[in-house]
Every structure is written in structure tokens, then in C-alpha cells.
Image: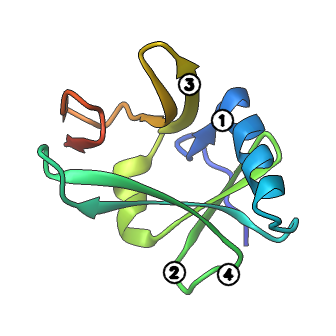
Amino acid sequence: METTMMNGIYISERAKEKVLELLTTEGKGDNYFVRVSVVSGGCSGLTYKMDFDNEVKAGDQIFEDKGMKLVTDRKSVLYLFSTTLDYSDGLEGKGFHFMNPNASRTCACGESFSV
């Protein structure tokens, strides 16, 4: 069951392009999606985790943006409402990052946050 919400999880065009490129490079089929979660750790207390997966688990929350399926667990969704997964390849750092309006504080490297 897919959920469409105003406060869902979103993906930028740049991140979508990079995800599609990585899925192709890694030989993963169309049944794979992006799994995002929040785990304890990092200097600010919480850390983002991103993987490719092809199995939806009980309790997962499923979102779709720009034709890309984004899945998270029930606990993590509370921290990720209205968050956008983005990708940058600029001088200030290359890689995926999360634009999270719920984060009250982030660490200098951008790897962890607190609410």
C-alpha cells in the first residue's frame, strides 16, 4: 500500500538521477527502492541511513515522489516527515544528504542531527 502525504519523504531530481545511475551500475532491477531510516549515533544523537532494498517489511511506510519509491520504518518516519533526499557533487562535498526541516541541530559534517 503506497502512501501519498503532504508531509511525506521526497527526493530531488539530482538525487533521483544518481539513485537510478547507482541501481544500474550495481545491476539492481526495477523492483529495488530507496530505504531511508534514522538510527542512534553520530555527534548530534541521530544518523541517517540509506540503502537499496527490494523487500517491504511489516510496518514500513511507503512514499512515492517523482516516480521513485521511498520506504522507511514506522519509527524513522516520525523524524523524516517533509524531508527531501538530495544529492550534491559540488566543491562543498559530494554525496547524498537530507534536507530535514525537523532537525533542530546538525553536526558540522552533516551526518547526524537532533530534534
In-front residue for pair 8/28: 28
**What distance separates the C-alpha of mark 4 from that of mark 2?**
12 Å
The label number, if any, that marks residue 15 in the structure image: 1
* Residue that appears at 43% across and 70% down: 74
* Residue that appears at 71% across and 63% down: 33
The label number, if any, that marks residue 71 in the structure image: none
**What distance separates the C-alpha of mark 4 from that of mark 1?**
21 Å
In-front residue for pair 113/78: 113
Dot 4 lies on which element? loop
* Residue that appears at 83% across and 65% down: 27
Position of residue 8 relative to residue 101, above or below, is below
**What distance separates the C-alpha of mark 1 from that of mark 3?**
8 Å
Mark 3 or mark 2: which is in front?
3
Label located before the other in sequence (4 or 3): 4
Label located before the other in sequence (3 or 2): 2
CB contact under 8 Å: marks 4 and 3: no
